[in-house]
Amino acid sequence: MPHAPLITFEGVEGAGKTTLAHHLAEWLRAQGVPVRLTREPGGSALGAHLRPILLREPLDAWAELFLFLADRRQHTLQVILPAREQGVWVLCDRYADSTLVYQGYGRGLDIPLIRRLNAIATDNLAPDLTVLLDLPVEDALARADAPNRFEAETLAFHNRIRAGYLELARTEPNRFLVLDGLQPLEVLKASLEQAVQERFLDAGK
Ligand code: T5A
């Protein structure tokens, strides 16, 4: 039996990831599809402890990287893989691409090394679809409702994040669905529903 899909949501702060992930979960459930909606950091029991540290405490860049990876490893092994094995679709608000862009493009840590560490943390699991919400950083930050220590970073930092995501999307066009995050929510929801319908639901008929 083919595994259930893993769909991840990525973008800068305030891009609309959480809103769209919740919408897709509801839309799929309404069609009888079993869904596990989860997030990083914080999707596992360990992650619940790590999330406030990662979002609030001042951290060295390498310490920050290792904590995100520890969060991902536990989350992948305890939540994501077991759900998929049971045929449950996993929708994850941020995943390994967040580390590549925030700790790699943003903090300037070694990107090939982060790729290798991500491969360990994820057990080589790659998302079947990654929804990237792209929009100017200023517009996205103006929406973010619960500021964390990343939101206090410079505009230059956030622009490196945006550029990093767009570069990843260019190198893996089949995995990424890039949506214009400035579009009204109803338009974004319809685009996402159509993409998921065509890519997974129609393909499985
Ligand atoms: N991080 C994370 C790393 O550095 N490395 C890693 O490996 C990982 C996993 C996590 C932080 O950790 C960093 C990145 C982050 O800084 P978080 O709280 O999980 O922090 O993530 P944020 O991106 O900060 O979450 P936000 O909730 O701020 O952003 P979302 O989820 O993108 O936005 P959302 O959906 O909550 O929407 C924000 C507001 O905008 C409105 C919504 O209604 C909401 O009010 N909105 C729209 N309004 C108009 N038009 C649209 N199209 C809209 N879409 C949403």
Image: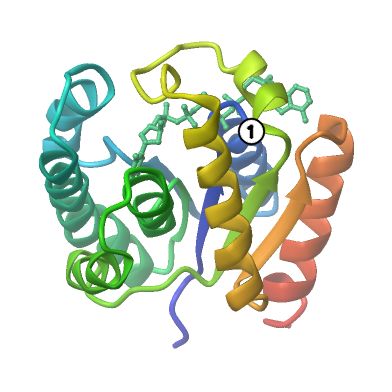
Residue at 60 percent of width and 73 percent of height: 175
Relative image position of residue 174 (x, y in whole percent): 66, 78
202 is higher (above) or lower (below) than 37 = below
Viewer-closest of 101 and 177: 101
Residue, disc 1? 15
Some atom of ligand 1 lies within 8 Å of the CB belonging to the residue at label 1: yes
Q: Is residue 14 left or right of residue 120?
A: right
Q: Residue at x 47, y 68 (%)?
A: 127
x and y, in percent, of residue 168 in the image: 55, 66
Where's residue 78, x and y in %?
18, 55
How did the renderer colour the structure?
rainbow
Res 78 visible: yes
Could you say whether the residue bearing mark 1 is in a helix, strand or loop?
Answer: loop
Instruction: Name the residue furthest bottom.
Output: 1
Closer to the camera in the image, 2 or 127:
127
Residue for point 26% across, 63% down? 110
Q: Is residue 63 left or right of residue 65?
A: left
Quadrant housing residue 24: top right
Q: Nearer the viewer, residue 8 or 45?
A: 8
Residue 171 relative to residue 1: left or right: right
Q: Nearer the viewer, residue 133 or 85?
A: 133
Is residue 11 something that shows in the picture?
no
Residue 164 vs 86, above or below: the answer is: above
Determine the image quadrant of residue 97.
bottom left
In the image, residue 43 sits, relative to residue 50, either above or below, namely: below
What is the three-letter code of the residue carrying label 1? Ala
Give the position of the N terminus as an image quadrant: bottom left
